[in-house]
Amino acid sequence: MKKILWIFGTIALALLLDRAGGWFLAKITKESQFRYSRLYNGNEEADILFMGNSRGLSFFQPYVEEKTGFTTANLSYNGMPIELANTLVKDYLDRHKPPRVMVMDISLLDSTRMDNKIGYQFNHYSPYSGRLSQLLKDKVPNDYYAGKVSHLYRFNSEVFQRTFFYWKKSDKDWLLDRVISPEMVANVAAQKPLRFSYNEKMLNHLADLVKYAQGKGTRVELVMNPYYPEFVPKLVNLDTLIMDVQRTAGVTVKKYINEVQKTEAFGDYQHVNKVGAKLYLDKLMQDGVISNKPN
């Protein structure tokens, strides 16, 4: 009898500690200045909304806000898949006044994105979104239900680490601040071709996202951000991707892959650094993709 009581007592203590720890980490999540915490606590209202994968961080918010006078929000994240992007953008639009414009880099159309379990990384935000909960339930059910049993399990992710890192400070300047190495420059010709792996279902998710944003009164701009110039020939099916996106979404894709030519403006083959971001954003403002605030 004592053994059984010890077992049940240990389980009860473990659950108590799990719930207490989960409550504390949830409190950090709610108070954090990280972009998704601001999304779900309703404090991310902005004139300009950006979305993309890691390349979406090229939309360097401090520079845009300084130059245009508009407020910005950026829901981009490393490896962001289109299904998750669709969920997050809809949640944003339902919780905030619709932004004037949403600018999205379409390179997030890649079927490997959801396979790498990036969705699981957002498990600690699932209590705040029925859409996100359903997506995780469908795509990573073991992780989703494990988070129901152990609340602490939800916080075992890189995304929560960033949530904690930005607990007391802004994440708007999150962007590469390095210059591509001489070794990478010398070896670009030896790099394997980059093929965007996408399907009709993913294209439909993008079209659904575009339609939802437009239905809220938000102008949608689809773009392809810059790549390192010598790496551009490695993008073997880029034109096909662009045509398919335009066919399904009904929006012209603006192609800026060759917009930045300076080596010192890149952090690697696929990402501009802060220098390159400013050069690129100047072009977006010049073309009217991003407009200035009226005086």
Image (tube, grey):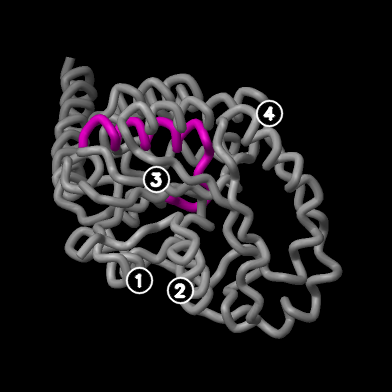
Tags 1 and 2 in contact by the CB under 8 Å rule? yes
Residue linked to disc 2: 278
Query: What residue type is disc 1 on?
Result: Tyr
Say which quadrant the N terminus sits in: top left
Query: In the rendered view, would you say 97 is above or below 176?
Result: above
Q: Tag 3 or tag 1, which sits nearer the N-term? A: 1
Q: Residue at x 17, y 34 (%)?
A: 19
How many angstroms separate mark 1 from mark 3 (CA)? Answer: 17 Å
Residue linked to disc 1: 63
Tags 1 and 3 in contact by the CB under 8 Å rule? no
| Left or right: 208 in relation to 33 | right
Q: Residue at x 17, y 41 (%)?
A: 42
Q: Which residues are magenta?
A: 76-96
The label nearer to you, 2 versus 4, is: 2
How many angstroms separate mark 3 from mark 2 (CA)? Answer: 18 Å
Residue linked to disc 3: 102
Q: Position of residue 207 (x, y in %)?
A: 53, 28
Q: Residue at x 74, y 79 (%)?
A: 185
Mark 1 residue crowding within 10 angstroms, few (<14) / some (14–19) / many (20+): some
Query: What residue type is disc 3 on?
Result: Met
How many angstroms separate mark 2 from mark 4 (CA)? Answer: 33 Å
Query: What residue type is disc 4 on?
Result: Asn
